[in-house]
Image: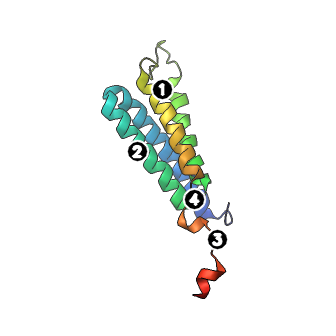
Amino acid sequence: MTGTWTAGRIATVLGLLVAGVLTGTAGWLVVDLWLPGGLLLGLLALFGLFLGGRIALGTGIGVGAGAAGWFLSYVFLSLPRPEGDFLLSSSGIGMYAYLLGGVVLAVMCATMNGPGDRPLSAVKAAR
């Protein structure tokens, strides 16, 4: 990670974790509601969260915080309720597509290089 752990960075990581939980919860509920459009909407929201985390912190830690919150929402929503049913059903291809698509987007955003990640060349600076 480039830089030290300051109070602002820790607050940003915790904020991204909470944003991941909220985005994940909304996405999981929308995917079942409107299958083709809800899946696209949920994946676009995840892409925005992961890319925003990458830009905000400048490293993959921002993506990891959002992805951890997103996955925590999946775990909590898939637990059985006291009534014996599940809030998150595993029927249909939408849930699996959202899970796989979110993982692909998280890996893509965590491994991409931005313009600030490249080293500066001494030759270009001398011109």
For this rendering, which residue is in front, 39 or 68? 39
Q: Which of the two discs, 2 and 3, labels the residue nearer the N terminus?
A: 2
Q: Which of the two discs, 1 and 2, labels the residue nearer the N terminus?
A: 2
Labelled pair 2, 3 in contact (Cβ < 8 Å) = no
Q: Kindly identify which numbered label has been placed on residue 45.
A: 2
Q: Nearer the viewer, mark 4 or mark 1?
A: 4
Query: What is the three-letter code of the residue carrying label 2?
Result: Ala
Q: Which of the two discs, 3 and 4, labels the residue nearer the N terminus?
A: 4
What distance separates the C-alpha of mark 3 from that of mark 4?
A: 11 Å
Tell how many labels: 4
Q: Nearer the viewer, mark 2 or mark 3?
A: 3
Left-right relation of 38 to 106: left
Give above or below for 117 relative to 67.
below
Q: Kindly identify which numbered label has been placed on residue 61.
A: none
Residue at image point 44% right, 19% down: 89
What residue sits right under mark 4 in the picture?
Answer: 113
Residue at image point 56% right, 35% down: 72
Give above or below for 123 relative to 39.
below
| Element assignment for label 2 | helix
Query: What is the three-letter code of the residue carrying label 3?
Result: Pro
Give above or below for 90 relative to 16.
above
What residue sits right under mark 3 in the picture?
Answer: 119
Q: Which of the two discs, 2 and 4, labels the residue nearer the N terminus?
A: 2
Residue 105: percent from left, percent from top? 50, 43
What distance separates the C-alpha of mark 2 from that of mark 3?
A: 31 Å
For this rendering, which residue is in front, 40 or 63? 40
Q: Which of the two discs, 4 and 1, labels the residue nearer the N terminus?
A: 1
| Element assignment for label 3 | loop
Badge 4 crowding class, 10 Å Cα cut-off, few under 14, some 14 to 19, many 20 or more, is some
Q: Kindly identify which numbered label has been placed on residue 96.
A: 1
